């Protein structure tokens, strides 16, 4: 559903991607493009999750789990018939930051935080997207203000991965001199992460 934050910083559309296609109210114009994009983001995060879990098991000399959510050799979704998965609470967000730069406005649009998910992926759709920063070694580093690269994606570790020994990614969004549009896919599987309370 749609939400405009009380502070007027951004507006958000949320889509529950774990639901069947015919239930999700995707934008009518070019619905198949949105669905293919989400399928791709889900595939990338599934492969990353699988590899991180294998690395964690290897590092701790643990026995292989009897069940893995996806094998790294699993091909991407059939984009015409996306597979469903029980206990999938993943969410796709489309966000628009207004970036109204009044003199008295806080330069930080979204305060430092970590996401509660397993993994979060944010693709940068154009090189004009700016504002995302991650905290590393005591400093804030710009992630998306790089005009020399294209097809860049940032993969965050969420709190849900703490149980496997991975530290969640502390990040924030700073205001820019123009509006900011971005999309985010949050991976939440009940198998590893308790379902959210709605």
Image (tube, helix red, strand yellow):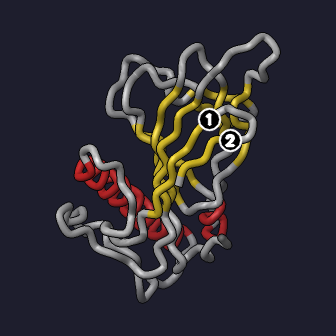
Mark 1, secondary structure of its residue: strand
Name the residue located 35 percent from the left edge and 73 percent from the top edge.
70
Which residue is nearer to you in this view: 12 or 79?
12
Mark 2, secondary structure of its residue: loop
- Residue holding disc 2: 5
How many numbered marks appear?
2
Give the quarter of the figure containing the C terminus.
bottom right
Name the residue located 68 percent from the left edge and 50 percent from the top edge.
114
Dividing the picture into quarters, in which one does residue 135 lie? top right
Q: Is residue 27 above or below residue 58?
A: above
The 10 Å Cα crowd at callout 2, few under 14, some 14 to 19, many 20 or more, is: few
Dividing the picture into quarters, in which one does residue 131 lie? top right
Check contact, mark 2 vs mark 1: CB within 8 A.
Answer: yes
- Give the image location of residue 89, x and y in percent: 51, 70
Q: Residue furthest front?
A: 28
- Give the image location of residue 9, x and y in percent: 67, 32
Tell me the distance, in whole angstroms, between the alpha carbons under discs 2 and 1.
6 Å
Q: Residue furthest bottom?
A: 66
- Residue holding disc 1: 10
> From the viewer's perspective, is 86 left or right of 143?
left
> From the viewer's perspective, is 135 left or right of 45?
right
Q: Is residue 147 above or below residue 51?
A: above
The 10 Å Cα crowd at callout 1, few under 14, some 14 to 19, many 20 or more, is: some
Q: Is residue 136 visible?
A: no
Name the residue located 37 percent from the left edge and 18 percent from the top edge.
148
Q: Residue furthest top?
A: 103
């Amino acid at each position: 559903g749609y939400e405009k934050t009380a502070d007027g910083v951004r507006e958000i559309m949320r889509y529950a991607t774990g639901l069947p296609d015919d239930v999700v109210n995707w934008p009518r114009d070019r619905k198949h493009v949105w669905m293919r994009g989400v399928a791709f983001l889900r595939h990338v995060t599934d492969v990353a999750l699988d590899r991180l879990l294998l690395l964690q098991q290897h590092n701790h000399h643990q026995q292989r789990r009897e069940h893995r959510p996806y094998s790294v050799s699993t091909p991407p979704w059939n984009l015409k018939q996306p597979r469903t998965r029980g206990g999938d609470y993943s969410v796709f967000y489309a966000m628009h930051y207004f970036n109204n730069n009044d003199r008295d406005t806080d330069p930080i649009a979204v305060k430092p935080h970590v996401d509660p998910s397993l993994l979060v992926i944010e693709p940068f759709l154009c090189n004009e997207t700016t504002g995302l920063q991650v905290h590393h070694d005591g400093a804030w580093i710009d992630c998306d203000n790089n005009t020399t690269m294209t097809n860049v994606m940032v993969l965050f570790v969420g709190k849900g991965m703490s149980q496997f020994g991975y530290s969640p990614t502390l990040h924030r969004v700073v205001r820019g001199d123009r509006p900011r549009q971005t999309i985010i896919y949050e991976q939440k599987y009940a198998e590893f992460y308790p379902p959210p309370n709605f």
